[in-house]
Amino acid sequence: MHSFRYMNLQPTLEDGLIILRPLYKEDYDALYTVAKDPLIWEQHPCPNRYKKEDFSAFFEESIQSKGALVVIDKSNNTIIGSSRYKSIDGADNAIEIGWSFLSRAHWGGKYNKAMKVLMIDHAFQFIEDVVLYIDDTNLRSQKAAEKIGAQRIIDSKKHLLHSTASIWTYCINKNSWKTIKEKFL
């Protein structure tokens, strides 16, 4: 039976470039060192997340989620960002991947691609669809989702930290993932 209920939401995953592992409270300082760059958040619906008080709330929510992962650059064993799995209400056979950010030094494709491929490969052992919710003004994240073969399926409004954001829903289906990886990745 495929279901996110059987899925480890905080696995340790790795390839030649990065390690993804569970987020721990002890990771706060290293992750905030990355997150305090305001340019990371400029297209995000929560553009003040670089501020310590906003990041602290985000970090605590990440710990409480029990689905958050840190991204570690294997070349120097440094935390360079984070991402998260989250169940989707009413969707037993799908999982959300989101809350992802990387240091600007790691922008440009290969690190985000490695992170998403590891997370998606893991997820497809348990579920049929991976969903990404992306703000309609976040062109950088939209392009990144499209680079890994995600298809935009829905436009909606979503409540996010006391604001209503216009969100685009992207989806990758397990049946198309093998072809996407062979063709584009």
Image (cartoon, rainbow, N blue to C red):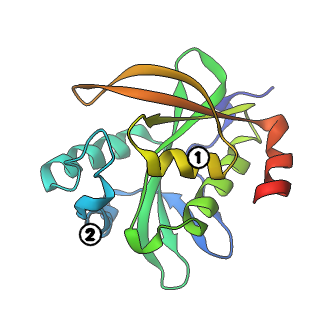
Regarding residue 119, the answer to whether it shows in the image is no
The label shown at residue 14 is none
The label shown at residue 145 is 1
Q: Nearer the viewer, residue 17 or 27?
A: 17
Residue 91, horizontal then vertical, whole percent: 62, 19
Q: Secondary structure at mark 2?
A: helix
Q: Nearer the viewer, mark 2 or mark 1?
A: 1
Q: Secondary structure at mark 1?
A: helix
Give the side of residue 129 with respect to residue 46, left or right. Answer: right
Please name the amino acid that badge 2 sits on.
Thr
Q: Is residue 5 above or below residue 176?
A: above
The residue located at (67%, 51%) in the rendering is: 148
Of the image marks 2 and 1, the number of the one nearer the N terminus: 2
Residue occupied by mark 2: 33
Q: Residues within 10 Å of mark 1 (few under 14, many from 20)?
A: many
Q: Is residue 11 above or below residue 127?
A: below
